[in-house]
Image: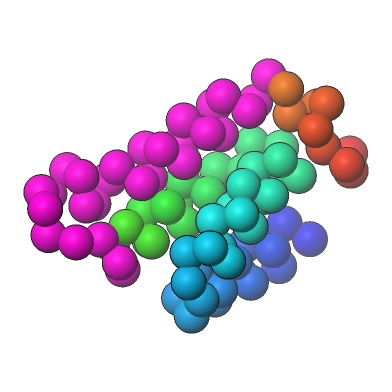
Amino acid sequence: MRIIFSITLLIIILSAPAWVYLPLIFLGIVLFPMYLEAIVLGVVIDMAYGGTQSIFFTKFAFGIGIALLVYLFAPIRSYLRFSN
């Protein structure tokens, strides 16, 4: 289920606007334990759609933000998950 969700999410990231895939990334963080794929997907989003402001901001800021979300939701993940 997790692999299918990640592959589907990658396809959605490459073809849909941000208001579609950002809630789905958040949903993956809530549903799956240690959904570290969100960090990789965040870097993919930043590489594909990032502007040219600065190298650090465009290449890694979104990935770091997703990593922080995964880290912050880790302690309360057991209360939010709907499946084991």
User: Of 16 and 40, which appears nearest the observer?
Assistant: 16
Q: How is the image coloured?
A: rainbow
- The x, y position of residue 67, in whole percent, is 46, 36
Question: In which quadrant of the rendered view does residue 49 lie?
Answer: bottom left
Name the side, left or right, on which 73 lies relative to 45.
right
Asked if the magenta segment contains residue 66, the reply would be yes
**In the current view of this chain or complex, which residue is farthest to the top?**
75
Q: In this view, does 48 lie to the left or right of 7?
A: left
Above or below 49: residue 23: above
Q: Residue at x 88, y 42 (%)?
A: 82
Q: Is residue 25 above or below residue 21?
A: above
Q: Give the range drawn in magenta.
A: 47-75
Who's the residue at 89% across and 43% down the image?
Answer: 83
Q: Quadrant of residue 51?
A: bottom left
Quarter placement of the C terminus:
top right
Farthest residue, direction right: 83
From the top left corner, tell me how far across and down residue 43 is, in percent: 36, 53
